[in-house]
Amino acid sequence: MPRFSIIVPCFKVQGFLRECLDSVLEQSYRDIEVIAVDDRSPDGCGAILDEYADRDDRVRVLHLPENVGLGRARNAGMPLAAGDYLFFLDSDDTLTPGALRAMADRLDEAGDPDVLVFDYARTHWWGGTRRNALAHVLAEAGDGTFTAAERPEILDLLMVVWNKVYRREFVGTNDFSFPPGYYEDTPWTFPVMLSAERIATLDRICLNYRQRRQGNILSTTSRKHFDVHDQYERVFAFVDSRPGLASWRPYLHRKMGEHCLDILAKPDRLPPSDKGEFFCRTAELFARHKPTGEPVPAELRVLEGGYAAYRIKRKAGQAGRELARRGGQAGRAAGGRLRRAPSAVRGHRPLDPHLVLYSAFSHRGVLGDPGAVYEKAREIAPQLRGVWVVRDQESAERLPAGVEHVLLDSPAYRRVGARAGFFVNNVNWPGALAKRPGSVHIHTHQGTPLKYMAADLLQRPGARHGVDVPQMLRRADRWDYSLVANQHSELVWERAYPCHFTSVRTGSPRNDVLVNAGAEAGLAVRARLGIPAGHTVVLYAPTRREYVRGGHVDRLDLARLAADLGEGHTLVVRLHPSLATGPARGMGLADLHRREVLVDATDEPRVEDVMLASDVLVTDYSALMFDYANLDRPIVVHADDWPAYTASRGAYFDVTSDAPGHVSRTSRELAWLLTSGSWRDEESARLRAGFRERYCAYDDGRAAERVVRRLLLGEEFPERAALAKVPGPAGARDLLAST
Amino acid sequence: MPRFSIIVPSHGVAGRLPLALDSVLAQSFGDFELIPVSDAPGAPAAVLAAEHARRDSRVAPVHSPPSAGLSGARNTGIRAATGAYLLFLDGDDVLAPGALAALDARLTETGDVDVLYTEHERTPWWDGEPTNPAAPLLAGAPKGAFSPAEAPHVTGVRLPAWGTAYRRSFVAEHRLVFPDGHFTDVGFGGLVTVHAQRIAVLRSVVVRHLLRRQGNRLNLPGAHHPELLDRTDAVLTRAAEAGLSGDRSGALFEQLFAAVLKTAAHPARLTGRHRRAFFRRAGRLYRRHRPAGYRGPGGSLGVQHRLLAAGGYTAFRALRGANRKAAGAVERLPRPQGLRTRLLYRRGLRRPIDPDLAVYCAYWGRGYACSPAAIHAKAAELAPHIRSVFLVEADQAHAMPEGVDHAVIGSRRYWQVLARAKYLVNNANFAEGVVKREGSVHVQTQHGTPLKKMGVDQSTYPVVAAATGSFTKLLGRVDRWDYNLSSNTHSTQMWERAFPGSYEQLEYGYPRNDVFYTATAADVARVRRELGVPEGSTAVLYAPTHRDYHTGFEPGLDLEAFCEAAGEDVVVLLRAHYFYDGGGRRGTGRIIDVTGHRSSEEVCLAADALVTDYSSIMFDYANLDRPIVVYADDWDVYRETRGVYFDLMAAPPGPVARTPQELARVFRDGSYADAGSAARRAGFRSRFCQFDDGRAAERVVRRVLLGEPPEAIEPVRPLAERVPAPAASPLVRS
């Protein structure tokens, strides 16, 4: 008996069907059966299904003699199902890699619940991917199981059939089935969710919900949308038949009202001439099922009036919103003019040579090189007044105590911006900040460049797509000093940014902490991340890809890698910061973190901490490798798509031949390198030594002081001293040595 | 003695130096020495040069202090050079692939010349298309080697010193050196022109010159501009000493003073009294060096010449100022672009649809080709009452076959027929402004079976999405389609997702492929004769596809080497993807360039075997049931960055080669045409040659133009019953 019975009804989806079936059959979790129901599709669906059934004996095809519609096609497939769980997958959607494994694990963990609700992402025809906005409901539901009464917010999620799996026995006992007509999900989902005694959630994107330009059956204009009333009648009939569920009536009544008004408001669903009739039918249904003694919510009261009143109210609402929008626009424009006016006055006051304005990573806080310079300046040059620019109140609250700050675009920001003698940033200052003659801009960069930057993207259509390099360079025209940590960077920055700055060989201030790290430096971080004492910590830090929209690719099966590493190891994953808020972490990383399979350190504000806490770095092409080399700890480069990476982004040198350590081309090779101990062999040390010589040349642990003295105070300070300090060993290595 | 000494000054451009050096070291022609010139040992450029020297013994770095300038660096390089020809390359430019081979071939052709001028490509630093400014200059030069008297206007004054090859003994004999200071190229080029006796030009791009973001340093404001006059003086003095003929000295004089006048006219380069002083001195030089009997140019330039001769600075300044203002004003005038044609089109739309008018277009107006042409021909036969107009770009109109009524894109007639035609047949899309009229019938024939992702499926691949533009607009164009042709189920399914719309799919096959079943042995022999395929040889069609991630500077497959290794009787028909049209490739010997040939189908008929990477030509060629070899040296990159609909490597139409050696091997040992190859092809054919049976055009004409009902259309003949056109030469079959 397979774990999952996946029922796939097919009708006119020949272009998408293969992708759907492949996404199911290629899952690492293989204990499944696929029941494909050919709903008398007039196109090639039937033939495709037969082809798959021939090829894979987990697939069975049911050809229906006549077209019955989505709901009844699912019903037809149900009796054939033998699995523990039923999964109704729509044939133009796809599963994400590893989805079934994650579901199976979660089902085991939750002790076979009646229903498991999981997360999805919408993939739009124009290429965008959006995560479900209510995903947090799934996370907040916790590890246990619950009923809808305990957590009614679970019903706020999209009430569709395909974002859940159902215990077959539970469905059978209750004799649930799908009705005919549109909106067939409604009289299935409400009864199922309300009757389920044990609901569990899985906060992981398991399914891509395809948003087609046309062809989504619900967004075609027809009278079939009137079916929604019958569907709610069925829901109410079900609740009537179960006395225990009577308390849900007010809730369902409200949902029904909202749902029908929503359909009415959408422009492409109902024929305009039928909208009045739809409204009346809805109002009638609404009145009939009105629970006694319950107040009608304000936004639904319109259903108690006439259609004319509804239309007037809607028109008024639209006009009001438009007015507010225009008013807001005009207000903002006027405000902008007003705010700029005083800066013209301020421009005549002299620059303050002791005022230093700092910002890092688009105003996110005291971080990176500017942060290191700031700390050092506070220590050795207290006469300098350092002010940080932060983007919002939230970032301001996270600043350490005693840090003077201004909010971006606030009057205070404009005040200090007009008078500061020095500007220190690791990204470009916003375009609105005009540079006054005499002020000094220090650009620290974010790391040593491996991939092509700025003007060098000329020949990379994918990487330059949507990037305004000329604007970037106009902003870079404000730089006076560009800090470099090695000669390679110096040459690259001068080539990629054809501007007017002077390169200063200071080293990277942010790396001082790595060069000067003591033995205990990483221990506190390890404790904070919950890493058991004595573990070998493998830090995996992949970078973005330019050949795929959004930049995120799953090049490694992280669960598998964590398992391969085995006892005594902790896998710490840090995604590129730009991927921290997108759907990337929902594709399994967050779930694995929750299950303590690995540690997701993407949210750690200081990447230096994460580096200090680790024993080895595994990265593809992240610039982190140059910083990490300062620790003189092993590095493994996982370069399984290097040709595609260079073709789409371009690279200044071949990291696979000038590598900082061993290079793996497949995930098996990577696992072998890590488990066999090769990651820290002599060859690795030899490669690293050469790499350090090339790319850690100016990092001697005194970079911040050099910046403060040479650039902020105008004192003499020598370039890198003859020998750098030997960096501190990783926390775990001493512990290992003692075992 | 190496053939070339390539001298690469690098001051201030160390960051780009590796690109320059690598572009030289990667040349297919290897007999050269590479002389990078850097500031001093230990300088960044010197370190890079030393690294290259360690790896390659042809690299011989030298040093020249920054104070000696560009001229000092080049002169140091000349002193160190031992090659037959000197070639200068700036450290931030690169040599085009094959440039040295082309130079060598040209020098062999012309015999020893003193100087060989070439074309170059100017690449904008960010926006805009590359240009080739030397091409018009060199266009008028004689074919072979020539003496300066034959083409006095070909001088070194207007051409950069880089990219030009100078015979080293010629430079040494006349003790030519780059003059110190700025404008050293003008000075050197002028001196070379004075002394050169035998000159030749190479009409292909040798150097790709990347423009600086801040523009040419020489054009910036500064005190260096008077040095242009020094150079002019020196060149003209030397010319007078050498006793140049009137023609030659006149051309030199005119070109030098064109540059001088440009600087004098530019208020930004020189200001106030500096500009006045420059003009005065230029006037003195003008009067001193004006060749006897020299007649200045006419027009505005002639006036400037006369003012210079007369020393009329005030008048000159007023004239240039007025001209500049006038030009600016004209620029600012709003010009109603295409308004007239838009109105014309609007008016046409108001008139009734012409039910007997059909408009055809192929590949955005590239000519009479592909399925639209095939349907056009069949319609003339089966639906003679329908008037047909083929749309074509102006530059291709001359190539239209006799008797095909055509309209040039953008012309009045173009808009008129587009507005009124009932039938509109295209293998791409009509222009954005074309609207779909109620009652008109748009037929999209497509131009290949999709292997790579198409349409909206490209949206997740930025490398291609960047070139596609707005997907919403794309779908707006798709919404005009009434019928879409497909030649197999795979295409039908993929078109549906790539181009979501409400059109009807016609599973009739591609009309352009009909000829693969109707052509005779005589036709095949005729095409081979026309293409110049030697009797009895095996013609291998090499048709690589376009790669969005390529910059046009990748070397690609070495076809000469392939011919050598593949076998004595092998010739290659090279058909690059149509985006490469107009490229500088020339067929030599065993390589016949058929890129410009109108009909891809005829080329296929002529070929005994096909080698391609991922081009959709393989689906068409498979109809001929002749051997196909897939040369997939970067499949992973293509798959990841471009996106594909199926794994070609899992179900290829024949043997797959990953390296040039493997490719040569399958031809040498005959496995390109063995039983294994045939078996793969059979599977491929059953999957992709589904509806192509030689009668596609007829079905389309009957269904669309004659309006016959779908059930009246004859069904597709099964694959087993079709007989493809015979191949020319008997093939090795086991």
Image (cartoon, coloured by chain):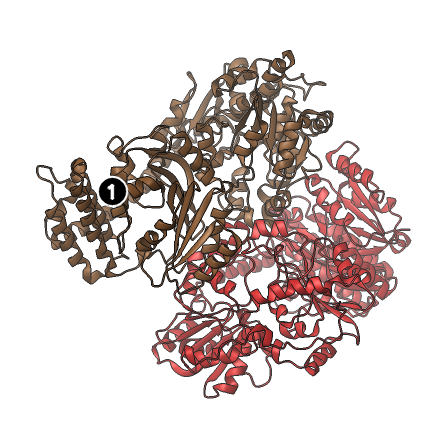
The amino acid sitting under disc 1 is Pro
Decide which of A85, B210 is in the foreground and name it: A85
Residue A443 falls in image quadrant = top right
Circle 1: is it few (<14), some (14-19), or many (20+) Cα within 10 Å? some
Drawing shade for chain B: red
Where residue A352 appears, as percent x and y from the top left, is 47, 23
Q: Is residue B520 visible?
A: yes
Q: Is residue A651 above or below residue B599?
A: above
Query: Which residue is farthest top?
Result: A738
Decide which of B299, A696 is in the foreground and name it: A696
Where residue B284 appears, as percent x and y from the top left, is 72, 56
> What residue is at 55 percent from the left and 68 percent from the top?
B447
Q: Is residue B425 above or below residue A176?
A: below
Decide which of A83, A103 is in the foreground and name it: A83
Total numbered circles: 1
> What residue is at 79 percent from the left and 33 percent from the top?
B41
Q: Looking at the colours in the rendered structure, which chain would you say is drawn in brown?
A: A
Secondary structure under tag 1 reads: helix
